[in-house]
Structures are given as C-alpha cells and as structure tokens.
Amino acid sequence: MTKEERTHEVYAYHVRAHILPTLGRIRLDRLEPDQVQRLYARLQQSGLAPKTVRNVHGVLSSALSQAVEWRIVGQNVASLAKRPRATRRKGVRTLSPDEVRRLWAAANPRWKTLLLVTALTGARQGEVLGLQWSDVDFARGTLTIQRQLQRSKRLKEPKEDSRRTLDLTAIERELLAEHQRQQGELRRAVGAAWESRDLIFCTDLGRPLGHRVVFREYKKFLRRAELPDISFHDLRHSNATILAAAACRSRWSRSVSATRTSRRPSSSTSM
C-alpha cells in the first residue's frame, strides 16, 4: 500500500466513523460552526483522544476548503470552530494484577480472553485483533505475532522488527483453548453463515472485530469495575507489572525470522 493509499484510508475512516454519524444529514451549505463545535465536544466526551479529534478536524477542514475552491460553499466553517487543544500525554498508567482481575471479572464472557491476552502479552490492539489460530502452537506453548488488523479491517504484516514469538503462560494456554472450544461451538451453530478467516477474536459470524467496538466495550468494563479510565494502549503496558508481581517465569521474545536465533527476556521477573 502506497503512502497516498494509506492517507486515503485514514481520511475515509475518520469520515465514516467520526464525521458522518453526526453531520451526515446536514447539507454542506447549511453547516454551521456551532454544529462542528458540538461534533468535537461529542467525540471528546465519547473518550476519543484530543489528538484524534484534531485529526478529525484536519480531515473536515481540508474537505471544506476543497468545497470552497469548487464554490460549493462560501466559507470553511470548520476554520471558524475552535479545534481541540493538543495535550501532552502523561506517564503511562498501568493496571495492577488486582485491577486486571477486577477488569476480567467485570467483562462479558466473550471479551475475557481478549482482555487478558492483551494484558499478559503486551501486544498492541491491532496485533491482538489480527491473531489467527495458526499463530498458536499449543504443543510448544507459543504465540506468534506476525500481522495487524487495521481500522479498515484489513490484515497487514507489521515491520520485521515487530514480528515476534512469545511463550504463553499456563493461564493463557488454558484460556485460549477454552476460547477455541467455545468458538467451535458457535461456528457449528452458525453454519454456512460463518466466515472462515481463522481469527481468534472475531464477531459471532467470524468477521474481524472493529477497533471502535473493542474500545467501547473496554471502556464499559472499566466503568463497571470502577477502575481508572486508562486507554486500551495503556492496558498492554500492564504486562511487565503483572509478570513481576506474580513472579512468573521469564517471557522470552523471539524473532520469527530464521536469521535471528538469540533470545532475550521481554520482561523482568524480579520482584
């Protein structure tokens, strides 16, 4: 995918996911600055990061500027709205082992394995959603991360240095095995409607999970467990805290590439 294609994909995602649901029914020549302002406020209230809202502003403003050039509208009303302030990201807030247990207990059954695998492996959201059953070696107790699910729901191979194989803990193997069993029952119940993509985490029809769906459910479980409102990205950084506190065996990260054979710990097990 070229840089232009990636840019188009990102712009299309912001339009589809963030702009159209609120402004899609308003004619361009009737769009007012206060309506744009309310859009930004609504996006922030939903938990969207200020940086992302600023990106939405950039997409909308760019489109309206083009509309002005084509004389579709008289002015770019997005330029009259006050865009969100850029905020400096504070230090990462991780969950303690007890807080992870509370989050797991508050989650609906179908989400429990996804949340715990994220917290224990430290994998990124796109990497977790892109996992396939072929990436799991139950006999050796390993999980290979070698692709990402993009927001467009396309699978993409990551950079070479992001490919890695992780040793699974006993609890991860147990959860994944049970998740596979339950998914098999669902697949048989759905029958021909099931889309065979080999995804570990998917919809009830085997389709890729949307990033926004995961984000919405994750935030709901945080509130239910009365936990701090941390991002899904921060959840993965709880990996080192959990392993150290639990005195788990070392987790080793290995390159999938055959040219790299050395191993190094991915997190400390010292107390």
Image (cartoon, helix red, strand yellow):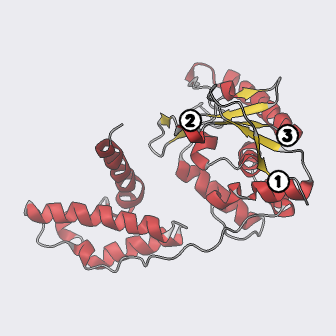
Q: Would you call the spot at circle 3 few (<14 residues within 10 Å), some (14-19), or many (20 or more)?
A: some
For the point 41% across and 59% down, the residue is: 18
Q: Is residue 27 visible?
A: no
Residue 38, percent from left and from top: 39, 75
Query: Where is mark 2, residue-wise?
Result: 147
Cβ atoms under marks 2 and 1 closer than 8 Å = no
- Badge 2 element: loop
Question: Where is 141 relative to 115, above or below?
Answer: above
For the point 70% across and 58% down, the residue is: 237
Which is more toward the observer, 23 or 88?
88
> Residue 75's mark?
none
For the point 34% across and 80% down, the residue is: 82
Q: Distance between the residues labelled 2 and 3?
A: 21 Å
Q: Is residue 59 visible?
A: yes
Query: Where is mark 3, residue-wise?
Result: 169
Question: Where is 154 relative to 134, above or below?
Answer: below
Q: In the rendered structure, which amino acid carries the disc numbered 3?
A: Thr
Numbered disc in front, either 2 or 1: 1
**Left or right: residue 156 compared with residue 174:** left
For the point 75% across and 69% down, the residue is: 227
Which quadrant of the view contains residue 106?
A: bottom right
Which quadrant of the view contains residue 224?
A: bottom right
Q: Would you call the spot at circle 2 few (<14 residues within 10 Å), some (14-19), or many (20 or more)?
A: many
**Left or right: residue 226 compared with residue 77:** right
- Badge 3 element: loop
> Residue 268's mark?
1
Q: In the rendered structure, which amino acid carries the disc numbered 1?
A: Ser
Cβ atoms under marks 3 and 1 closer than 8 Å = no
Q: In the rendered structure, which amino acid carries the disc numbered 2?
A: Arg
